[in-house]
Image (spheres, rainbow, N blue to C red):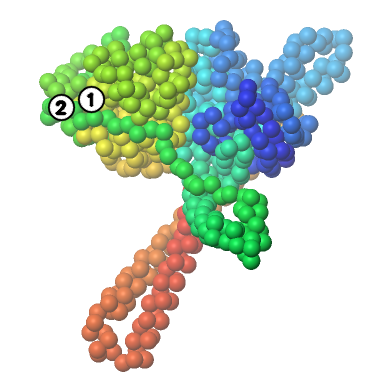
Amino acid sequence: MLQALDITFRRAERAIFEGLTFTVHAGQKVGVVGGNGVGKTTLFELFQGRLHPESGDLLRPRSWRVEHLQQDLAPSERPALEFVLDGHRALRRVEAELAAADPDGDPERVAELHMRFDDLGGYQAAAQAGTILHGLGFAPGEFNKPHAAFSGGWRIRLNLARTLMAPADLLLLDEPTNHLDLEATLWLEGWLRRFPGTLMVIAHDREFLDRATAHSLHIEDGRATLYRGGYSAFERQRADALVRQQRQHEAQQREIAHMEQFIRRFRAKESKAKQAQSRIKALERMERVAAVQVRSPYSFAFGAPDRMSHPLISLRDVDLGYDGQPVIRGISQSLLPGARIGVLGANGAGKSTFLKCLEGTLAPLSGEVVRGRHAEVGYFAQHQLEDLEQRHSPMQHIERAEPGWREQQARNYLGQWGFGADMIGRAASSLSGGEKARLVLALIALRRPALLVLDEPTNHLDLEMRDALARALQDYPGAVVLVAHDRTLLQRAIDELWLIEDGRLSTYPDDLDAYAAKRREQVARVPEAGAMQPARRDGSAPNRKALRRAAAESRAALRQLKQEVKRHERRMEALSAELKAVEAQIADPETYRQTAAADLEATLARSATLRRDFLAAEQRWLEAAEALEAET
């Protein structure tokens, strides 16, 4: 198991951890959650041995192999596939020994090395690395492309692939979804669910945490609490705990007020002085329950445009692409004020290409794009974080965008976006990725555009900022076109889905859950790294008949779960209909005038029985549905 025992750690004069204690058991998958600056990344650095606590102990089995996602690996000229294979260091060492060994000089040594190579999965390693690369969105033609030739976001994907390639007993992933699209995120969820070791992951994506983890480690005020369940379960439990804490605080405040009133009234009276002193000592010893203070640091909005054209943009039989080669053909769509569009599609399908056309930086290869007079576009993409004037502070950016504003007005505006007094004067180059993203969004909001075109705006944003962004998009009266891997944001901010697939853009007829389920089913048809069968000693493949039988048994179990869910649904529908009829009878005043007392009592009893049966059926349905979701 993994244990932190009474850990204290400070940076400068600030205590990051004080008395930090928790236990994670082998094989558990844990989401590490908490506000910015609470020490989530610091905790990972402690487990890696890069930092050391002032006091306390960090315990784990000595034999455990610990792997972590390195975001900042230097660009390499290694081909992508070889770069990923390098993550399996033990295999690379055996390969090097084999290359250096003299088969004639020590044949037994060479035979032993071949056995170790086989034990480490060497004969399947290239296929395993290819599977990981494919899952993370790399095309086979890119496998031999040098690591350094990829853009920053894609290099981080390669760093993640390299980490997943390494055998690990403890896997530490800090923001692994930041540069992934929805398809790659869905694949990663499945890989992590099958990962047999212990997982600790920091992420700001509710859906990802819900599906990839089964426990949540909440860090706050230098201490940690382990909750059972993914992020949604943690939120519910945390909310319940805060409600209880507030009630305890209020009860304690009433008790304190009563004791203080007694002290003021009787401490001067000789007959009551002893009791008053007793209450004074009790107040001094009392461990105070703090009042609950939950306040988001963000309170911004996207203001209403002064005017909006109707439609904003019309695309008429448009082909989009590069160097004369179409990526998407025959787009015929119009964007109206108030539209809420989420754009779906696999990596490389053309989502960003379509958004660049809406923004106006990519001209169509053919067809016509008609823009209204009042159709200003506010465009967000990751490259804009680096397009900021890096020497200028957030305050200087706002002053340049709104030269007529007073200083306090600019300070107030930046405060709505989470920029405190200590941040507004810092150079943009010193800001974190999330802070830069907030600044870009703040500058976009100043312009009050009629159309927001957002390409993965949640990268680097914390959960509170994502919540605030969803609320702001809900209230925004203009149109929104959004590409995001954060399904919670899509579900809260989007009314309609468009799908780019096979070079065509069309309206997606179902909801996001159905799309995610479809993608998971497609991913499941591709052999997964976590599900690869080890080669036998003789080099033969696993028994295909056994594999087919196992697959058939899995399908049968899945079919049985689906049938069970439908059976409970039919039972709930029948009970609900009968209960509604009985309750309508009870609600009718004529029932009480025309029904005998014994019959009325039987009707009331029947209502209670039906309600109890419905709740039981609903609970069974929930259990079956959760089991089905876990299997799919």
The picture quadrant where one finds residue 580 is: bottom left
Front-most of 632 and 407?
Answer: 407
Disc 1 + disc 2, Cβ < 8 Å: yes
* Residue that label 2 marks: 306
Indicate which disc residue 271 carries: none
Which of the two labelled residues, at mark 1 and mark 2, occupies the earlier sequence position? 2
In the image, residue 389 above or below residue 607: above
Front-most of 379 and 320?
Answer: 379
Indicate which disc residue 448 carries: 1
Residue 332: image location, x then y, percent: 19, 27
Badge 2: residue crowd in 10 Å (few <14, some 14–19, many ≥20): few
Residue 590: image location, x then y, percent: 23, 84
Residue at (44, 66) in percent of width and height: 615
In the image, residue 281 above or below residue 62: below
Tell me: 481 left or right of 386: left
Disc 1, SS? loop
Disc 2, SS? loop
Tell me: 74 left or right of 56: left
Q: Amino acid at mark 1?
A: Arg
The picture quadrant where one finds residue 527 is: top right
Q: Amino acid at mark 2?
A: Asp
